[in-house]
Image (spheres, helix red, strand yellow):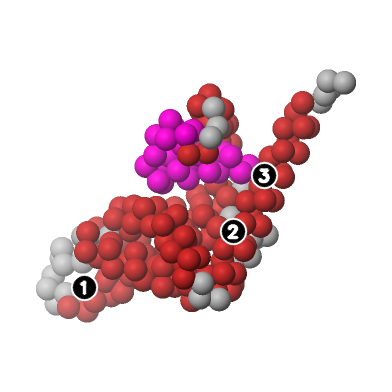
Amino acid sequence: MPDKNPKKSSSDTDRQTSAQTRAEDADLMARVASDDQDAIAELYDRFVSLVFRMAYQALPTRPEAEDAVQEVFLRLWRTADRFDSERAALVTWVMLITRRHIVDRLRRTRSRISTVSVGEGPGSSAPDEASSLEQSERFGALLKRVDALPELQRTVVMRSYLGGQTLRQISEELDTPLGTVKSALSRALVRLRERVGEEVVE
């Protein structure tokens, strides 16, 4: 007998997929917390490009971004036992920790520059670092809204806007029809625009 309520069926499937993904993420971080080298390598391989992209966009030089990546993964390893899959998706957890580290780093840099620049007159502050810090704070607020999206929509947004992947690449990696991926991105952007304004996601 055909399903008379396909929307409900699709919703149930989304919830099951989300629950499975979160369970797998929880298992991965539990293994990271127990110093499982395979799990640590899996965590690194899965998120290194995303963490580097965030660091490189916010920090002034590539060497600083590369240093930040290593420090972020060290922090992820040290805090792995605090990860709660019921409160946030793993990708959101990784990005929040990355953002916090970048903010801390920018604040330390700004503090050092301010100390050295005392008495040097106007123009001796660090506007680029301050601007990056402000952008990072806004990014954190946006992340929380992205995390509230349904599983597929969240994944597509993260991979396309933050991971730099094309929709075709995402389609192939997720083994999901390209049209479905495009539709998920479109619905996600509509939801985000309703909450934070069109200028935030463009």
Q: Are marks 1 and 3 in contact (CB under 8 Å)?
A: no
Residue 161 lies within the magenta run = yes
Q: Please, what secondary structure does the residue beneath circle 2 have?
A: helix
Task: Name the N-terminal-most of marks 1 and 3.
Answer: 3
Q: Tell me the CA gap for discs 2 and 1.
A: 40 Å
Label 3 environment density (alpha carbons within 10 Å; few <14, some 14–19, many ≥20): some
Q: Residue furthest left?
A: 120
Q: Which residue is mark 3?
A: 17
The image quadrant that residue 149 belongs to is top right
Check disc 3 and give the amino acid type.
Thr
Residue at (16% x, 67% y) in the render: 124
Please report the bounds of the magenta region as a residue range. 150-172
Residue 153 lies within the magenta run = yes
Q: Which residue is mark 2?
A: 25
Give the number of the mark in front: 1 or 3. Answer: 3
Q: Nearer the viewer, residue 143 or 162?
A: 162
Task: Name the N-terminal-most of marks 3 and 2.
Answer: 3
Q: Please, what secondary structure does the residue beneath circle 1 have?
A: helix
Check disc 1 and give the amino acid type.
Ile
Q: Is residue 51 left or right of residue 87?
A: left
Q: Residue furthest right?
A: 1
Q: Tell me the CA gap for discs 1 and 3.
A: 48 Å
